[in-house]
Image (spheres, helix red, strand yellow):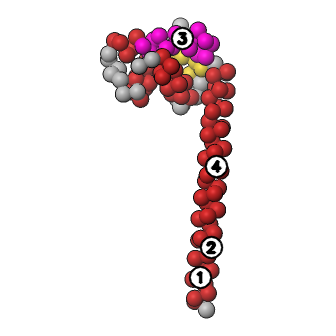
Amino acid sequence: MRDETIAPTIISTIIGSPSGKSMPVKELRKAVLLSLQLDTDDKSSKKLFKKCVQALEADGRVKLGADGIVKLSKSARKEAAKGSKKKGKKDKKKKRKKSDAGESNAYDDDNDKKSGKK
């Protein structure tokens, strides 16, 4: 597995954390490795995670504090938000089309039932 495949998982895991901005590095590593179905106790997996965090830190996408907290930079949060907004807009359009089709059928069914009762 390469750094490029782990980086998006790291960012999405931090965004999915309760604060949405930061997370302790040990919890982050465990969550990322489990989501990628890697062994959390394997040294090579830990080294790969460490290299990826260092690469993200060099790119300025995350900051690693002395207290072991990984913080997501504002630019990385904006990038992640752009991706989710685009996806969200597509999903909303699909939901509207489905709900419009579903509502018209439900309305027709109600009218049929009402006209049959009279």
Between marks 4 and 3, how big is the CA–CA gap?
35 Å
| Element under disc 2 | helix
Which residue has dot 3 on it? 55
Q: Is residue 25 visible?
A: no
Tell me the kind of residue under disc 2: Tyr
Report the front residue among 76 and 15. 76
Between marks 3 and 2, how big is the CA–CA gap?
56 Å
Q: Is residue 2 left or right of residue 91?
A: left
| Element under disc 4 | helix
Q: Is residue 50 left or right of residue 112?
A: left
Labels 4 and 3 touching (C-beta < 8 A) = no
Quadrant assignment for the N terminus: top left
Which residue has dot 1 on it? 112
| Element under disc 3 | helix
Residue 59 in magenta? yes
Which residue has dot 2 on it? 107
Residue 101, image x, y percentages: 61, 64
Q: Residue at 57% of width from left, 11% of height from top?
A: 57
Residue 31, image x, y percentages: 43, 26
Labels 3 and 2 touching (C-beta < 8 A) = no
Between marks 4 and 1, how big is the CA–CA gap?
30 Å
Q: Please rate how many residues cluster around mark 4, counting C-alpha atoms within 10 Å: few if below 14, some from 14 to 19, many from 20.
A: few
Which residue has dot 4 on it? 92
Between marks 2 and 4, how big is the CA–CA gap?
22 Å
Labels 2 and 4 touching (C-beta < 8 A) = no
| Element under disc 1 | helix
